[in-house]
Amino acid sequence: MSLTGKTAIITGSTSGIGLGIATELAREGADVVLNSFTDTPEDHALAAGIAAAHGVRARYLRADMSSGEACRALIEAAGGCDILVNNAGIQHVAPVESFPVAKWDAILAINLSSAFHTTAAALPAMRARGSGGSSTSPRRMG
């Protein structure tokens, strides 16, 4: 399947699964936007390497995915997308009675809330581009 002409934003994509997804999307012809919470020369070099290897546009945009405002700003800075991969995630392991509340809040913000904020920001433009699925009315459960 060719993804030429499509733009993909992959959160949490400077290593591991996210980087693998970004690389595969680029291999299929998609322009890619890499993301993490850092902003190092290596982050930008990863994007440049993907662009050179696959002949696509690739760039790096920093965003703190624990901030809803930053999640939405990421989508805006990228100029929207056709494909959104909500991959950012963190973990922490500790007994529940000593689990740091700040860590719990960060896990929820990055692993859960960031997907809501990026999707909410990306979906209108995705639908305008003919991607992102169709809009449906909410359904009551029960």
Image (cartoon, helix red, strand yellow):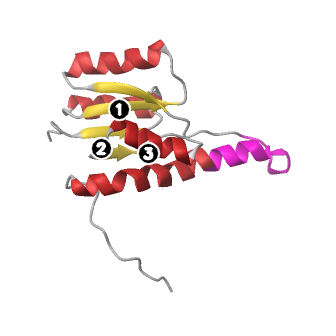
Q: Which residue type carries mark 3?
A: Asn
Check if mark 1's residue and mark 2's residue have beta carbons within 8 Å.
Answer: yes
> Looking at the image, which residue is at 36% across and 77% down?
137
Q: Which residue type carries mark 1?
A: Val
Report which residue position mark 3 lands on.
86
- Where residue 81 is drawn, which disc sits there? 2
Mark 2 vs 3, N-terminal side? 2
- Whether residue 96 is in magenta: the answer is yes
Callout 2 secondary element: loop
- Whether residue 83 is in magenta: the answer is no
Report which residue position mark 1 lands on.
33
Query: Is residue 52 left or right of 67 when viewed as pictured?
Result: left
How many angstroms separate mark 1 from mark 2 (CA)? 9 Å
Q: Determine crowd level at label 3: few under 14, some 14-19, many 20+ residues with C-alpha closer than 10 A.
A: many
Q: What range of the chain is rendered magenta? A: 93-108
* Place of residue 31 in the rendered image (x, y in percent of width and height, measured from the top left): 25, 32
